[in-house]
Amino acid sequence: MFEGLKQDINAVKERDPAAPSSLQILLIYSGLHAIMWHRPAYWLWNHGHRFLARAISQIVRNRTGVEIHPAAKIGRGVLIDHGMGVVIGETAEVGDGCTIYQGVTLGGTGKESGKRHPTLGKNVTVGCGAKVLGPFSVGDGAKIAANAVVLSEIPEYATAVGVPARVVRQYGRRLEQLDQVHIPDPVSQEFCRLQMENDRLQMEINELHKLHEKE
């Protein structure tokens, strides 16, 4: 347990340039506190003490602003930086060495049962405000840009940006040039779809009128 705590503290020191001493990190870092208390909650959940496990997770949520379901699997050396607004769902898995910034959601879409939250590989970075939604994997070393919405699998050592997110780099190489001008307008597309549906219905109505007149 103490070795795991040491790894979590070292993760803060290595990846947060504003981090003070180990003692101050232990005493005042809310992201570390959320992970520290998740460990016993996870143990309790898996040993049948589910009410107590949920109670711990809710108390920690109120104190730190980080909500981690007690069934979620959190690896070693994970950094939750700032932490406020982070939500990690029941079947989510976070690999060793991951970095998660404020406002991140590792959630589901509400359409699945069983495994319904994402699995992050090792050393994944998820930028502030990003949403990773669904039962898919994000490969080792991948980077999710701030405010991205990830709805499908991301390969290892890839960088994903946008809404919905798409891969623009992998292994440090650019895969495509982002076009910030010729982006499809979802509102216009929806109007076109509605117009086509309206035209189809009007044709059906006209056909019904013709049949009625013949009768």
Image (spheres, rainbow, N blue to C red):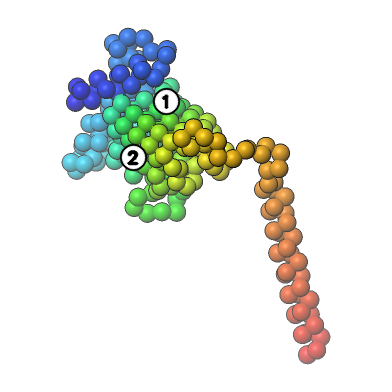
Q: Residue furthest top?
A: 21
Quadrant of the rendered image containing residue 201:
bottom right
Name the residue type under label 1. Answer: Gly
> Would you say residue 70 is visible in this rendering?
yes
Callout 2: SS: strand
The amino acid on which the numbered mark 2 sits, given as a three-letter code, is: Glu
x 19%, y 26%: residue: 1
Q: Quadrant of residue 25?
A: top left
Badge 1: few (under 14), some or many (20 or more) residues near its Cα, within 10 Å? many
Closer-to-camera residue (124/185): 124
Q: Is residue 175 left or right of residue 136?
A: right
Report helix, strand or loop for mark 1.
loop
Give percent across and percent down for residue 177: 62, 38
Q: Position of residue 22 (x, y in %)?
A: 30, 12
The residue shown at (19%, 43%) is 48
Report if the CB atoms under discs 1 and 2 are less than 8 Å apart: no
Work out whether residue 80 or residue 55 is closer to the camera in this orientation and state it. 80
Identify the residue position indicated by label 2 in the image. 93
In front: label 1 or label 2? 2
Q: Which residue is mark 1?
A: 83
- Image coordinates of residue 75 in percent, x first then y, are 29, 33
Q: Nearer the viewer, residue 135 or 194?
A: 135
Using the image, determine if residue 119 lies above or below residue 212: above
Could you tell me if residue 86 is visible in this image? no
- How many numbered tags mark residues here? 2
